[in-house]
Image (spheres, rainbow, N blue to C red):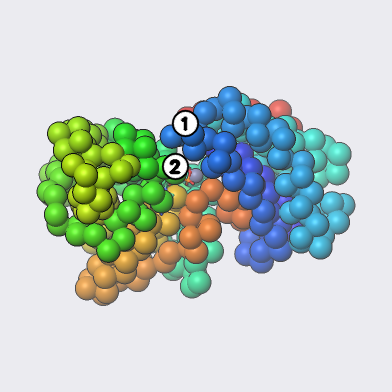
Amino acid sequence: MVILGVETSCDETAAAVVRDGKEILSGVIASQVPVHAPFGGVVPELASRKHLEYIIPIIEKALFDSGIAAGEIDAVGVTRGPGLVGALLVGLSAAKAMAYALRKPLIGVNHLDGHIEAAFLSENMPQEPFICLVVSGGHTALYKVEPEKGNVLLGATRDDAAGEAFDKVAKILSIGYPGGVAIQNLALGANPKAIHFPRSRFDKDSLEFSFSGLKTAAANFVRSNHLSAEGGKGSESLLKDFAASFQEAVVDVLVEKSILAAKQCGLSSIAAVGGVAANSRLRERLGQAVLAENLHLYLPPVKFCTDNAVMIAAAAYRTWQRLGPQAGMLDIDAFSR
Ligand code: KG4
Ligand code: ZN
């Protein structure tokens, strides 16, 4: 079964053609980073306008690259939410129009299910059930993943998402957007123990997260040390050490809680997905931790961690396998949260 996937929940316009949820025939992304970078974050109205400009050419390119004619598509899968409603509506409208014109079913996909599906795009297939750390700009949560039975939420952030913390700290410093990438690059070769930042753990058995205290501590450090994109108190090394120490504080908690979740559930496999799972330090530290604990780690390639349509087409295929065609899909609406 060949599915055309469409994703426009935030600032990437993406389309992909995937056969049977696994064989990637094409995957195309138009990034809006240059559009939002001057603002240090996504401007929803600009995102919608750019999606409108890119969506048709991106779908055409995904079809062209796949070598599949539009008429050979068996279904269209599209992100319904959560995300920016104006942005979602562009992809949803385009997907509905395609499905209607081709007389093919439309499959609505939850963006988080898409990210979780990316775990199955790792080099090796994770054995179910497994622990999945979902870390993106909007979410930080641990799930017990068993798609056939329904994924179980084990714990989530009480305030900011990890990616949001990266983005906000990067914005205070004006070091670029997306913040996670900017901080990761600054942190390269710097000392992650140079500055002590708080780690919120709640009680020792808790699988919940909190990053607002860390964000405030980081913002206070920036202010009191006059840190900026040019460096701190005139020193570039302080800025780099700040980035490495901040990143380490985020990574420490994400790694610890993922291992704790695996132990509590008696599971031996952990996957990490979502934009922050692209972080090289998180990938390295998770690798070390699973080795020490004799567990298995599944990480999708970086390109399937950040928003993409391959994961949406794959998740649509899973929905189709579970539920088959559903009536009234052309009436589905976008949702923000
Ligand atoms: O999954 P995603 O592309 O979109 C959402 O669903 O939110 O995640 C975007 C988030 C942003 O907060 C971005 O700063 C973060 O992922 N991110 C990273 C890295 N690449 C993207 N965070 C840390 N390190 C990275 N290399
Ligand atoms: Zn996402």
- Position of 27 compared to 180: left or right? right
Q: Is residue 121 left or right of residue 206?
A: right
* Residue under the image location 19 percent in, 32 percent down: 223
Q: What's the mark number on residue 39?
A: 1
Q: Is residue 333 visible?
A: yes
At a point 71% along the width and 28% down the height, the residue shown is 331
Q: Amino acid at mark 2?
A: Tyr
Would you say the beta carbon of the disc 1 residue lies within 8 angstroms of ligand 1?
A: no
> x and y percent of residue 296 in the render?
35, 71
Q: Residues within 10 Å of mark 2 (few under 14, many from 20)?
A: many
Q: Position of residue 279 (x, y in %)?
A: 38, 57
Residue that badge 2 annotates? 177
The quadrant of the picture occupied by the N terminus is: bottom right
Q: Which secondary structure, mark 1?
A: helix
Looking at the picture, does residue 44 appear above or below residue 234?
A: above
In front here: 174 or 220?
A: 174
Q: Is mark 2 within 8 Å of ligand 1?
A: yes
Image location of residue 281, percent across then percent down: 31, 61
Does the CB distance between marks 2 and 1 fall below 8 Å? yes
Depth check: give the residue in front, 233 or 180.
233
Of residues 64 and 228, which is closer to you in this image?
228
Mark 2 or mark 1: which comes first in sequence? 1
Q: Looking at the rendering, which quadrant does residue 91 occupy?
A: top right
CA–CA distance in space, label 2 to label 1: 9 Å
**Residue drawn at (26%, 57%) of the image:** 255
Indicate the quadrant where residue 12 lies.
top right
Local SS, label 2: loop
The amino acid type found where label 1 is placed reads: Phe
Classify residue 214 by image quadrant. top left
The reply, left or right, for residue 167 in relation to residue 250 is right
